[in-house]
Every structure is written in structure tokens, then in C-alpha cells.
Image (cartoon, grey):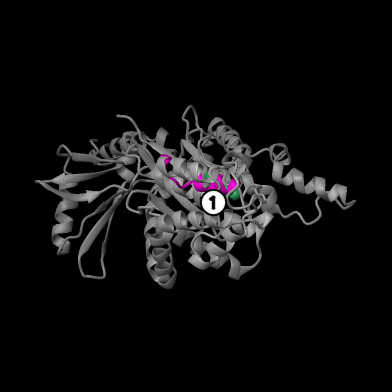
């Protein structure tokens, strides 16, 4: 069975997305997530945001605006795992495990850190003046984001390539130290979309908040129109032929037009279309393509609790992958239960069987369920709901009876069936190999002890 390509990327939540972010990152990511062979993890990198910004209002506003932008732009949360980094406590925990193996020398070489040091030196200051441990450790947190989900491909801008390389470096070190021949972490690759437009801003330089030359995306039609009217053009008068290939207004148009629209516009410019009218055309094109999404955006922003719910569901999906994996990593480094301090791999069948246990509990609605926990406490199974404790108990008895287990895999999880009905489900796994390993562990755990 082939595993699907896991694509993962984070968006630092410090600003309001503009047209350049949309064309350069958001639109291609949403398109990529529609590929049936892709398993996409997109998240709000709000822990990263704290490194750059100490204004709580701005952090909160940006998180909401970015979430709303991606959702309004058509991100399908049923297809992708869309979450806030700060809703996944496993991320900072993994960050620490990785911090303990990351070479300080590696982090000394990070571009962002070095740039800050250079600036301090230039100003005759202490090299580390104003540099926080957050900035310094930024690449380790990012490595945890990526390695936690064993991402294959990480779509990023060029400035982030080094960080993805560092994630490989740190992951490899961990694999080497603790893997015992097993590769815990997949080696990620940065994905730089050559074909994706880097949009020019109002003044023709790259559209960027730091140049104050952006076109707003979803704030309002009027804001968009006002910004477009400020696009710098040459001084050719209406009636004079324009040079489309040297006009960033044309480049902006191109990024949103069909080939036919583009050629038509080119022709008109060559024939002397006035810049005022050209700006009007650009506005019409953008408004036509983004107007509906803008309305969805404002709806989402006016109902933050809907977004909160969606993101919490996303966090649950992400944690279903992260939690069992982190349990394995804790085990690997020696953070193990005192009760059964033997690593999973080294456990004999007998010990595993002895130590696995059923824990039953009652749901708020009165129904009965149980979990099957492995020796180390990780969850092997969570049962469906049963009307009464007796039925639940009968099911656990049958599972331990030694009869052949009816295990059915589906995607990255599996369920256990008894008499034609699913009675319990596994957590979701990062890949099919971990799923198959868990099925094996389950069989071992449910094998009766013969002595
Ligand atoms: N550092 C990235 C940026 O500023 C954001 C980010 C955080 C990220 N964690 C990530 C990107 C993990 C890709 C993968 O653009």
C-alpha cells in the first residue's frame, strides 16, 4: 500500500493576509489540499507568532483573520487537518525532546538569528542584545511542527528552506540516538513552488507588509479599490501604447486572469487603454474572483465561535496522530512508566499480554464504554457506546477469549468487529506502517497467557 504524501505548512499569525499572501501561499495550498493523494496539515503557527510579537490583541486578531481567510478561501476542513499550533500540547513537548539533541552550533548558523547578531554588531551593541531564546530556538519549534506529523513535503518561502534543512538535521540526530535502527522521523523536504506568483506590490517591489505596498484581500471592496488606485504606473497618457511586460499592474492582472482575459487585456494596453481604466479592469477582475470569499470571510469573522469549533475539531484530529507518536518518543528516550519500564520493542509477548488492561467508563449520556490500554498506558482501542455495563463487559470478555480477531483497517486507523458489528476503534495513526504495528501490538496484547 502506498502512503499518501503528507503536506504540512504553518502560517505565522502576526499580520492580516494580503493579496500577495493569497496568490503566493494560500491559493496554492488550498489547491494542493484538493489532490486525492495528499494528506494536508495546515496550521496557525501562533507559538511562532509570540516570538515576533508581544501584543496580545494583535496575536488574537491575526489568528482569527488568518483562520477566516483560509476558510473563506475554500479550505475544506473535512479533507485537511487545520489547527492552531497552540492547541497541540505535544508540540512544545516534542520541542523539548528535540532541543536536547539539537546542536547549539547548528542554531548559531540560523539566518534569522545571525541577521540579528550582525545588526547588533553594526550598531556597536552586545551581539545578543534584544535576542530572546524564542528567536534562537525558533528552528527547533519549527522542526517539532514538521517532525510531529512526519511530513514529507513542506511548502515554504525561500527564506524558510534552511529551517526545513535544520528539521532534517535534528530529526536525523534523534533517529540515530534513540531509533535503535528504527527511523522515528521521516525526512521532510522543502517544497518551493516555482510556478507560484510572487506578486509585485503597489510600487513594483515584492508585495510585502514591510514595504507598505500591499493590496488588502478581504477587508472591503473599497479598501481594495483604493489600494489599486495607488498602483504606480508610468506617465503614458490615455491613447498612448502601454508596455504590458514592464507593467506590474499587468503582472497583477495576469495572476488572476485566464489566458484569454490576459491576452485581451494585453491587446487593450497596447492599443492605448488609459491607466485609470486599466485599474478599473483590475479591480473588476479581483472583485469578481474574491467578492464571494470576502462575504464568507466577514460572516466567519462575525461568528468566531464557529471557527473555534472547527479549529478544536482540527486539534482533535491532529492530536490523535501526535499523542500516540509522542508516547512512543517518550518511551524511546527513557521517560517510561515505573510499573513496566521495558521498552515496547523489547517486551515479550507474555509481558505485553499481562500488562494490557481494559478500563471501562461511563459517558455523560449514560452509555458504557471501555478503553484497552497497552502496558505503557497508550490507548490501543476505544470502544463504541454500549447501552449497559453488562454488554460492554461481555464484549471485553470475548475480546480476551483468544478467538481470532476480526480487525478491519480503514485509512490510517482500524476497528475491531464482533459478530458483524464494529465494537471498538483505534486512534488515527501517522502512517500505515504505524497502524499495522499497532494491529500487531493489539493481537499480542489480546493473546491469552498460556502458562
Ligand atoms: N516559520 C514559518 C514562516 O514564518 C511558519 C512555520 C512555523 C512553518 N512552523 C512551520 C512553516 C512548519 C512550515 C512548517 O513562514
Q: Position of residue 229 (x, y in %)?
A: 59, 60
Tell me which secondary structure the magenta stretch mostly adopts: helix
Q: Quadrant of the N terminus?
A: top left
Magenta stretch: includes residue 189: no
Q: Residue at x 46, y 35 (%)?
A: 152
Q: Quadrant of the C terminus?
A: top left
All told, the count of numbered labels is 1
Residue 237 vertical placement versus 436 (above, below): below
Residue 149 seen in the figure? no
Q: Residues within 10 Å of mark 1 (few under 14, many from 20)?
A: some
Magenta stretch: includes residue 250: yes
* 131 horizontally vs 375: left or right: right
Closer to the camera, 405 or 124? 124
Q: Which image quadrant is residue 98 in?
A: top right
* 351 horizontally vs 189: left or right: left
Residue 315 vertical placement versus 35 (above, below): below
Residue stretch rendered in magenta on the structure: 248-259
Residue 54 vertical placement versus 134 (above, below): below
Q: Which image quadrant is residue 213 in?
A: bottom right
Closer to the camera, 98 or 106? 106
* Secondary structure found at label 1: helix
Which residue matches tag 1?
A: 21
Q: Position of residue 35 (x, y in %)?
A: 35, 40
Q: Residue at x 68, y 38 (%)?
A: 103
Residue 408 seen in the figure? yes
Amino acid at each position: 500500500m502506498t502512503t499518501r504524501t503528507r503536506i504540512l505548512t504553518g502560517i505565522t499569525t502576526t499580520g492580516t493576509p494580503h493579496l500577495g499572501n493569497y496568490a503566493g501561499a494560500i491559493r496554492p495550498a488550498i489547491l494542493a489540499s484538493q489532490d486525492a493523494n495528499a494528506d494536508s496539515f495546515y496550521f496557525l503557527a501562533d507559538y511562532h507568532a509570540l516570538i515576533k510579537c508581544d501584543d496580545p490583541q494583535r496575536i488574537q486578531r491575526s489568528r482569527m483573520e488568518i483562520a477566516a481567510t483560509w476558510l473563506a478561501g475554500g479550505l475544506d476542513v473535512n479533507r485537511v487537518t487545520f489547527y492552531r499550533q497552540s492547541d497541540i500540547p505535544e508540540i512544545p513537548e516534542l520541542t523539548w525532546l528535540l532541543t536536547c539533541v539539537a546542536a547549539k552550533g547548528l542554531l548559531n548558523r540560523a539566518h534569522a538569528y545571525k541577521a540579528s547578531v550582525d545588526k547588533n554588531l553594526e550598531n556597536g551593541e552586545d551581539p545578543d542584545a534584544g535576542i530572546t531564546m524564542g528567536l534562537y530556538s525558533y528552528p527547533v519549534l519549527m522542526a517539532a511542527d514538521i517532525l510531529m506529523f512526519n511530513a514529507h513535503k513542506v511548502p515554504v518561502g525561500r527564506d524558510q528552506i534552511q529551517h526545513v534543512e535544520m528539521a532534517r538535521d535534528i530529526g536525523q540526530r534523534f533517529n540515530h540516538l534513540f531509533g535503535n535502527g528504527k527511523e522515528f522521523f521521516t525526512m521532510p523536504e522543502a517544497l518551493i513552488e516555482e510556478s507560484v506568483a510572487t506578486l509585485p506590490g503597489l510600487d513594483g517591489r515584492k508585495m510585502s507588509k514591510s514595504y507598505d505596498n500591499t493590496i488588502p484581500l478581504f477587508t472591503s471592496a473599497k479598501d481594495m479599490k483604493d489600494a489599486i488606485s495607488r498602483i504606480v504606473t508610468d506617465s503614458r497618457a490615455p491613447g498612448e501604447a502601454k508596455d504590458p511586460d514592464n507593467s506590474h499592474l499587468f503582472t497583477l492582472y495576469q495572476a488572476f486572469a485566464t489566458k484569454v482575459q490576459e491576452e485581451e487585456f494585453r491587446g487593450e494596453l497596447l492599443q492605448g487603454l488609459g491607466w485609470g481604466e486599466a485599474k478599473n479592469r483590475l479591480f473588476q477582475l479581483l472583485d469578481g474572483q474574491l467578492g464571494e470569499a470576502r462575504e464568507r470571510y466577514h460572516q466567519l469573522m462575525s461568528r468566531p465561535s464557529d471557527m473555534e469549533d472547527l479549529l478544536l475539531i482540527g486539534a482533535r484530529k491532529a492530536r490523535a496522530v501526535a499523542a500516540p507518536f509522542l508516547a512512543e518518543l517518550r518511551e524511546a528516550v527513557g521517560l517510561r512508566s515505573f510499573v513496566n519500564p521495558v521498552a515496547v520493542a523489547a517486551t515479550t509477548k507474555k509481558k505485553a499480554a499481562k500488562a494490557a488492561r481494559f478500563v471501562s467508563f461511563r459517558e455523560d449520556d449514560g452509555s458504557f464504554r471501555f478503553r484497552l490500554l497497552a502496558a505503557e498506558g497508550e490507548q490501543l482501542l476505544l470502544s463504541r457506546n454500549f447501552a449497559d455495563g453488562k454488554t460492554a463487559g461481555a464484549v471485553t470478555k470475548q475480546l480476551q477469549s483468544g478467538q481470532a480477531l476480526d480487525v478491519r483497517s480503514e485509512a490510517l486507523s482500524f476497528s475491531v468487529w464482533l459478530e458483524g458489528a464494529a465494537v471498538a476503534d483505534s486512534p488515527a495513526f501517522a502512517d500505515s506502517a504505524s497502524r499495522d504495528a499497532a494491529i500487531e501490538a493489539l493481537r499480542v496484547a489480546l493473546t491469552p497467557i498460556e502458562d
